[in-house]
Image: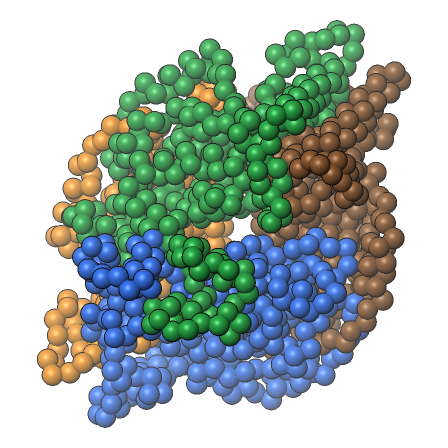
Chain colours: A brown, B blue, C orange, D green
Amino acid sequence: MKLNKEQQQEIKELQSQEFKTKRVTAPELEKVLFEAIPVLDHGFIRVIDYMGDDTSIVQAARVSYGKGTKKVSTDSGLIKYLMRHWHSTPFEMCEIKYHVKLPIFIARQWIRHRTANVNEYSARYSILDKEFYLPSKENLAAQSKNNRQGRGEVIEGDQANEVLNLLKKDAEQTYENYETMLNEKYDGSIIDKNKSGLARELARMNLTLNTYTQWYWKTDLLNLMNFLRLRVDPHAQYEIRAYADVMLDNLKKWVPITYDAFIDYRVGGTEVSAKGKIVIQKLIKGENINLEETGLSKREWNELMLAFELNEKIV
Amino acid sequence: MKLNKEQQQEIKELQSQEFKTKRVTAPELEKVLFEAIPVLDHGFIRVIDYMGDDTSIVQAARVSYGKGTKKVSTDSGLIKYLMRHWHSTPFEMCEIKYHVKLPIFIARQWIRHRTANVNEYSARYSILDKEFYLPSKENLAAQSKNNRQGRGEVIEGDQANEVLNLLKKDAEQTYENYETMLNEKYDGSIIDKNKSGLARELARMNLTLNTYTQWYWKTDLLNLMNFLRLRVDPHAQYEIRAYADVMLDNLKKWVPITYDAFIDYRVGGTEVSAKGKIVIQKLIKGENINLEETGLSKREWNELMLAFELNEKIV
Amino acid sequence: MKLNKEQQQEIKELQSQEFKTKRVTAPELEKVLFEAIPVLDHGFIRVIDYMGDDTSIVQAARVSYGKGTKKVSTDSGLIKYLMRHWHSTPFEMCEIKYHVKLPIFIARQWIRHRTANVNEYSARYSILDKEFYLPSKENLAAQSKNNRQGRGEVIEGDQANEVLNLLKKDAEQTYENYETMLNEKYDGSIIDKNKSGLARELARMNLTLNTYTQWYWKTDLLNLMNFLRLRVDPHAQYEIRAYADVMLDNLKKWVPITYDAFIDYRVGGTEVSAKGKIVIQKLIKGENINLEETGLSKREWNELMLAFELNEKIV
Amino acid sequence: MKLNKEQQQEIKELQSQEFKTKRVTAPELEKVLFEAIPVLDHGFIRVIDYMGDDTSIVQAARVSYGKGTKKVSTDSGLIKYLMRHWHSTPFEMCEIKYHVKLPIFIARQWIRHRTANVNEYSARYSILDKEFYLPSKENLAAQSKNNRQGRGEVIEGDQANEVLNLLKKDAEQTYENYETMLNEKYDGSIIDKNKSGLARELARMNLTLNTYTQWYWKTDLLNLMNFLRLRVDPHAQYEIRAYADVMLDNLKKWVPITYDAFIDYRVGGTEVSAKGKIVIQKLIKGENINLEETGLSKREWNELMLAFELNEKIV
């Protein structure tokens, strides 16, 4: 991530703002407001604005005239109760807005979360930055052999170098040709003054999917947690997890009580099917279990044992 | 609207809060924050929180590192452009949260706007306040004769008194029987200590639709304008318009530039169909027009003439 | 539920329709199409239209040119996998549309599910039917003593009769006064030809919340399951559960494979928190557990034991 | 668009299906069901399923027990009324599902319409087809000089050839390197049996944005019209307009009455601001107009004159 001088200056100006407000504030989150927190090789996440804190959830759940409650302990009990019983609407009463820089192929995954507001940098209107994502070597994984949608062993040695060379060379070349077609360099300088450039909305099609884009992205706390639950999961693609991890840290600064409940009931929790419940019951009672009679597939059995870290029972 | 002492005190405490923040603020809106602005006979609207201001729209439209622009005039030009061309996503970048007290039959109309977050006071859990809406005499209208969905002349004299008496008597009686079934008064006092009360989730069914309820309601600026456009319209039911009018005034305090564009392009504007455009063209050119040849129904013709205040051409 | 002759005839006509289509059909659901299935004392549910079946889920998940797969067993395996891992978008590819008649206080609960399309019978435009919900005696429950949002013991004897009398009397009287204010009977006959009636949008406010309304309600399969998961739960209010139970039966007729997976993974399943997982592990390993050290509240502990039917461990 | 034999066979099988149903059908749309209608050089649109027709809109608007009305003329009048007055919920009662093949840069534009259901072909799981979009020469436009977001003159001669060569060469080369990194050809054959391939979720980042993807996309009639209104507009990017034009033709086959109203009130209509209305009034009355006094910017003035084809008044 290379912010230019002007961008650094603009951010500094925002960070030095100080206003008075009657609205609730989240002091820990205020500390990182506007800051460009680096993600991947050229990406970042910036918290631009937020609305509400833990007390806002309680206040809305109680449809209160004042603060929701007087005591943090009461707030905490109620928030845990709401989380546990999927009373989700009070969590919608807080809102957060981000500025994110991310590779296009990750942006395409991200945008599938529809209950959010988005303003993306327009490549019909502007020239995209000359920046593309190249994985670091430890993230250069082979296709998984037992999970068609995941990664396996890390690729090393010559093959790793070849992959990185191809990615770099292709991204640079397609970007260069993008400039040629536009008849304009990434910095806005015209290449040939006697020519018109190809329309930007067309030229962009020559860029590779690891080119960086950026957007403003705003969502409420409930939908942020839905996003994070899926994207901090070890099965999520590493590149989007890198963003989710930063956002999870933001969450802790913003709404610490909700964060704790979220970790306990969602991120760290598990689901058990009706058939799985019977298996657990039998295990607790020390009864014999015949895999076939459980109605679980071998895969389901193993997922269940893994969830409870009963690794010795995996078949 | 009769706020009790405790409620007044709670509101006063919120209003005397003062925090420091780096977030943008809307100073005019801050002045009315938390205040219970009266609507109808017992209802109110309170602005509880907000996020963003006019500059946030520009900032998101530009996917900016700092403020969107340096000058108010540039902001204004861009906001007008966005509004005119239905570039709606930047307006989603601002958010507002209300606490509203309103009659149930109006709440049912209101909730049809689905893109908002709601937490309603639960009548499964709590006893509803002993307050119901009675129209003032000047709002006691007869059914319209030419618009099946609207109001006609005001009802006066004995009939008006009879209507108000019936509304009052029925609301009071059904509320009293609600208390009897609950075995509990509105203030929480038990009626007969030897009896159990009917479940609240059941007893509530005896209340009339003019009973007041309350909720926290949060939406983004785009959807707020969609709501207001429909609900400040003269065809909207008076009782919901009374709320919308207050919210329109809030809008002006919050995002004055957007407010101006909204009034010009949405509230004060009109739509003209393909067939209507030809009629307008001919009128401008002074050509003869035969209603039948226009393809407009008589009703459409009149709606068009009315939109341009060409009252003399109404047929 | 008293359908009049005209309504019965209209339904019969729809049921005798037969068209040819290339679209997939759900033969078991076709059998009940348009039928008014009774719910509560005057309500009903009618399936009006649907789109897709189990194979449509597989087809979309595979982004297929033809059917998703050749074999039911493959379909079933994939649908179970999608359900287990919350790959939810393929379930959005099926759609269902209902006509529902239901008491207003239940309609208010129902509409909180926002991701659906609704067209409600307009009481601004038309006169509501003279029908209101009266619970049967076995559903006349007292307020729960240990769950502020639920029902306790059944109310019996004189108190039950009194409650039913009050509900009946108040509903009849407020409806009668509704007619008086409208100057029009429920059947459209004018009461006093020399008077104008009060606007319908106003008169309706005198009705009690157990008055029946009706709507067309359409949703996709995913959101239908979200609705059902919450509303067939024993903690849901009985009156909405009565509707959900019929819809669950429809689900089985429509998409039987999905239905099985839904029952196993959602309705019959449970969630376990991070702290709860450690408790389960210890129980399986036969280790001693000190409630305090688990970090669970007593309530959480009991909920966990109940979920696995370890009733003897409830404290 | 080159469908392989298997795909052609799968489509043929679907097209030869014939089921009986009691649901309403749209006979003209049935004729094109499942057919791959070509768009751009390798894309297509296929209608996979639909629910409802024109009568379903009327039926829902009336909350009817049978068909909405008896006569087509009544249906037509009501549908026009609903469209004109933005009574939008009845249009949500019809649903359509498409299978679309389209270039990724267009998919990114398309997905900004959030109120739809989507299942995209997964490049984490599968290898993308070896197909990329190359514009035909007449669509090779230069960047517009007066509209920063549009196209200007067509690029011709050597420059056109150069652009097409660059696009073709870069797409082919990046795809070839995609195969190298995957260690697998587009047809599934392994390149080097002693090597593991790079994870698909990573390798895809090397592809250019004109690579084709495909998805199942489902939406209701209201949101389809919102999509079409924006995307058949002459200001929409040509490549998405090509898809929208086909879908507009589908709309006519599916709901012909709604189609007519949509063309009249939406596609062919225009909006006039409050200030614009005064200008139109004055033009009709033949009064003198001073541009400055109107409050319109020069640009707004011209947009208004253009809307009414008063080209001689453009300044």
Residue lying farthest to the top in this orientation: D193
Q: Can residue D123 be seen here?
A: no
Residue appearing at x 12%, y 78% in the figure: C191
Residue at (35% x, 71% y) in the render: D286
Q: Residue furthest left?
A: C193
Residue D300: x, y in percent? 51, 61
**Which image quadrant is residue D34 in?**
top left
Q: Position of residue D94 (x, y in %)?
A: 35, 43
Q: Is residue B141 visible?
A: yes
Name the one closer to the observer, B85 or D104.
B85
Please state the total of marks drawn on the protein image. Answer: 0
Res C43 → quadrant: bottom left
Task: Name the residue at 34% across, 79% down.
Answer: B174
Quadrant of the image containing the C terminus of chain B: bottom left
Compared with residue B266, is residue B141 higher up or lower down, i.e. above or below?
below
Taking the image as shown, residue C100 lies to the left or right of residue A304, namely left
- Where, by quadrant of the figure, is residue A273 drawn? top right
Residue A106 position in % (x across, y down)? 70, 37
Viewer-proximal residue among A311 and B296: B296
Q: Nearer the viewer, residue C44 or D242?
A: D242
Residue A141 lies, with reference to residue A104, above or below; the image says: above
User: Could you say where residue B83 lies in the image, as x and y percent from the top left?
Assistant: 54, 61
